[in-house]
């Protein structure tokens, strides 16, 4: 078992303006719980937790061990990260087609879709599909010992369902942010590594990085894991009519739940410390300061796609829009990150070396009315993080070797277009 990442190395340091902005969301019941870490380079300048595990009563304040449902952060930090790891080892060809990787897709409309199209959301797959409804309906005619919805056995019929879907658009022509595409990516990865996605990530990435105790999928039917998690506390998400309960300790996303809790588009739970630790290691690799992830591969995954003009998407990640970005107005266009439906977000400004992790449970207890509130809170928090980051002085005078070569570019700029290691900014 690895050692939890929350420890004395993480400072108890907060910025009052950021505190107040986040606490506003607790006071107006946009979310019951929140956690935030912000850093510049290796220095954390803000770290705080706020609110309760669920709407009180009773009052149950969260701490740094609180586990958040990270929702779509699973894409870049789960399936996308596994893809990055396999590419760096030469085990995954991003130009390979679905016909060459998954038998169910050989004769489908998606046969010529490539893996990089899945990662940058231009595969032609629809954004969503109610797999859970179809799987649940099919189970109604099955005896109890043959029901699959909510178990990993649901992946087999799910493959057939997805392979028969109609194209939403011609592959490679239109960006359509797609959960379905990342479900397919998961099946490709699992066929390559010959083990479930969660096991591969645990053994090859999360455990070696020391975050496996605080960054993981909750797999249905894994009784050993359930015993280990009995003493852990999860932040609540939605009061789910379908499951007839407030979801807490199970994945919020219904399709991820239907597939047994493990999917490429959603399903990871994590603490704020573990999320920052993983993000920080990726940033270090990008800078050429850490060899766990290959710098060139990280830079490739963080480069905006050139297939679709004006897309903000990279391989598994996103970048800010020019206007109205949830990253706010102060993070430069040379920034990568992602949002999660439950109210989570991560951003890395590659020009200023600013990292921001902001986790909430804004779908609790209901989803309605929360999107508009988060559209105000998220940019405000990220603007304050970027503003304070500008005041943090990092001594780069003694930078040597790769650190000197990969030093940050001036705010708002990017590496020249003819540089093969160019970041995602244009």
Image (cartoon, helix red, strand yellow):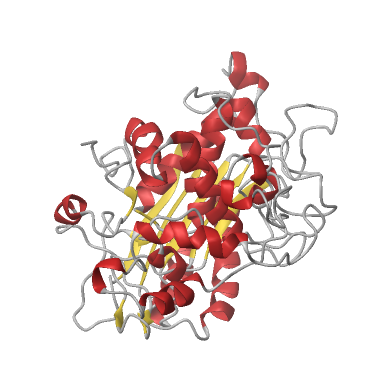
Would residue 295 be seen by someone viewing this image from the given angle?
A: yes
Horizontal relation, residue 40 to residue 172: left or right? left
Q: What residue do we see at 43% from left, 61% from top?
A: 359
Q: What residue do we see at 42% from left, 36% from top?
A: 194
Would residue 383 be seen by someone viewing this image from the given angle?
A: no
Q: Quadrant of the C terminus?
A: top right
Rendering coords of residue 198 (x, y %)? 37, 46
Rendering coords of residue 180 (x, y %)? 58, 61
Rendering coords of residue 237 (x, y %)? 36, 73
**92 to 370, vertically: above or below:** above
Most foreground residue, 277 or 307: 307
Residue 144 picture quarter: bottom left
**420 to 254, vertically: above or below:** above
**303 to 266, vertically: above or below:** above
Horizontal relation, residue 190 to residue 239: left or right? right
Horizontal relation, residue 169 to residue 408: left or right? right
Most foreground residue, 162 or 18: 162
């Amino acid at each position: 078992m690895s050692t939890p990442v929350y420890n004395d190395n993480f400072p108890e340091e907060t910025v009052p303006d950021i505190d107040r902005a986040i606490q506003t969301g607790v006071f107006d019941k946009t979310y019951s719980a929140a956690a935030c870490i912000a850093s510049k380079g290796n220095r954390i300048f803000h770290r705080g937790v706020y609110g309760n595990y669920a709407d009180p009563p009773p009052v149950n304040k969260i701490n740094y061990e609180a586990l958040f449902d990270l929702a779509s952060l699973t894409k870049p930090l789960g399936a996308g990260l596994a893809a990055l790891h396999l590419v760096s080892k030469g085990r995954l060809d991003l130009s390979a087609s679905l016909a060459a990787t998954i038998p169910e897709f050989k004769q489908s409309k998606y046969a010529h879709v490539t893996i990089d199209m899945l990662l940058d959301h231009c595969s032609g797959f629809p954004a969503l599909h109610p797999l859970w409804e179809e799987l649940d309906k099919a189970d109604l005619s099955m005896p109890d010992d043959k029901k699959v919805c909510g178990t990993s056995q649901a992946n087999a019929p799910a493959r057939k369902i997805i392979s028969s879907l109609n194209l939403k658009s011609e592959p490679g022509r239109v960006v359509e942010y797609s959960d379905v595409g990342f479900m397919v990516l998961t099946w490709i990865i699992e066929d390559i590594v010959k083990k479930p996605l969660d096991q591969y990530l645990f053994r090859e990435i999360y455990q070696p990085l020391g975050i496996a105790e605080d960054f993981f999928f909750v797999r249905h039917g894994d009784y050993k894991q359930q015993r280990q998690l009995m003493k852990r506390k999860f932040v609540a998400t939605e009061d789910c009519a379908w499951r007839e309960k407030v979801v807490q300790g199970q994945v919020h996303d219904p399709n991820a739940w239907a597939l047994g809790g493990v999917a490429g588009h959603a399903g990871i739970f994590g603490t704020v410390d573990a999320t920052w630790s993983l993000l920080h290691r990726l940033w270090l690799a990008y800078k050429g300061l850490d060899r766990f992830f290959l710098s060139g591969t990280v830079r490739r995954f963080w480069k905006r796609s050139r297939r679709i003009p004006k897309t903000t998407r990279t391989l598994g990640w996103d970048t800010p829009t020019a206007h109205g970005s949830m990253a706010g107005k102060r993070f430069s266009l040379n920034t990568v990150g992602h949002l999660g439906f439950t109210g989570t977000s991560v951003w890395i400004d590659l020009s200023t070396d600013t990292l921001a992790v902001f986790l909430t449970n804004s779908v609790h207890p209901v989803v309605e009315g929360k999107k508009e509130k988060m559209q105000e809170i998220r940019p405000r928090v990220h603007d304050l993080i970027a503003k304070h980051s500008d005041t943090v002085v990092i001594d780069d005078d003694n930078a040597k070797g790769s650190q000197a070569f990969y030093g940050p570019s001036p705010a708002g700029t990017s590496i020249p277009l003819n540089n093969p290691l160019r970041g995602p900014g244009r």
